[in-house]
Amino acid sequence: MNRLLKILILVLASFMVAGSNGCPFDVDEILRGGSDGESASLTWKRAQHVIGQSSMTVVESDRSTDANTLLDPGGVIVSGGRLYIADSGANRVLGWGSPPDRNNEAADFVLGQPGMSDDGRGRDRAGLHEPVGLIAGSWGLAVADLANHRVLLWNERPTSGPQDADRVFGQPTRDEVLLPGCDADAMDSPWGVAAPGSRLLVSDYENNRLLLFERGDASGADARGVIGQPDLSTCVANRGQGQASADSLSGPAGIWTDGDRLAVADRFNNRVLLWDSFPEEGEPADRVIGQEDMDSNTTNAGGLERGLNAPTAVWWDGSRLFVADRGNHRVLIYDRWPSRNHVQADAVLGQPDRRSNQRNNTGDNSPVNARSLSRPEAVYSDGEELLVVDSDNDRVLSFDISD
């Protein structure tokens, strides 16, 4: 359709709804010529290689722990040319000197375990228990150590291991693990981490809040701020209101921020919340994905084409937004930072279309392949490569998204 004609249609629509709450059409979709944007060709794309399994069509879940195995992986990040994967079920973080470019490449080093064949639960500065979220930068590495109710920090990005963490938030010291708590210096099952500027943002999953720390503070420091709760001693879901709102959370999982924008996978509200600027305490989100409005939290609201089912991760690579829609066994791709509530994704991985949500939807008789996903838990993109943590398949998939 001619662009001028599209604009004329929008002008006419605005007159038709004069005095109402706004245009009933999805302006973004009309301007890009329909519901499929530039990323449409990525739908049901095949991964180019796999980490944690010997091939794309094999899922072995009963293997002994080693340098090339994964067990319920929960997080992924690339920083300083190195790849880090939170291997949650094996209580460790695996590191590669560079992201693999072939199937089943073994890790170069391990954090949280004394060796590559170890997978025990650790509670001191050298150990981990179900690590999930990761973030890294020139300042170092932070790992959400979920079952130890803490976040461990390394002052430099690890290049070898094992290596003790330098500091901890959520516990008094690196070698103490107390019960979970709801206070400025305590956590309950932290899931996601992000690093805006000199700060560290933590999604305190079971406490239904985000905690904001000064990243350089000493171990055991108090959080400096909170998002999703009225204060640092309140931790009930949706602020105890009984329904979702623009300033409440219920099981926040993966988070992304660059210090300006903020995106939160609000798992039990079946939505992703977006802020166009980093919020002050109590500031409501600007819009929502997965729900028609801020007060709703229905699973797959409005159908599979626009709804979400327990999303656990979100990532913005500067031009596209990625959402791990865990309960629908897919990753949704949006070509731009959404400007409206409840927008439809431009592409989907793990399913042949936006109306499907079958576990390991291979399209053939194989139990798993390069297209299929089972409860994807985390995503990372540098704009050229997308890494998807395919948790239930004990693997991480690499997709070429440079098209």
Image (cartoon, rainbow, N blue to C red):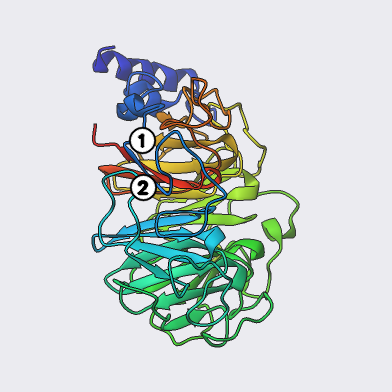
Residue displayed at 36% across by 15% down? 9
Figure quadrant of residue 183: bottom right
- Where does residue 214 sit, x and y in percent of width and height? 42, 78
Dot 1 amino acid type: Ala
What residue sits right under mark 2 in the picture?
104
Discs 1/2, front: 2
Left or right: 254, with 137 as reference point: right
In terms of secondary structure, where does tag 1 sit?
Answer: loop
How far is mark 1 from mark 2, CA to CA? 13 Å
Q: Quadrant of the N terminus?
A: top left
Under mark 2, the amino acid is Asn
Circle 1 residues within 10 Å: few <14, some 14–19, many ≥20? many
User: Residue 305, how many percent across, how many down?
Assistant: 53, 26
Residue at screen point 41% across, 39% down: 338
List x then y, in percent, for residue 218.
Answer: 45, 87
Location of residue 22 with respect to 67 vertically, above or below: above
Which label sits on residue 317? none
Q: Residues within 10 Å of mark 2 (few under 14, many from 20)?
A: many
If you read the primary sequence from the N terminus, does the residue marked by circle 1 or circle 2 appear first? 1
Which label sits on residue 47? 1
346 lies above or below 134: above
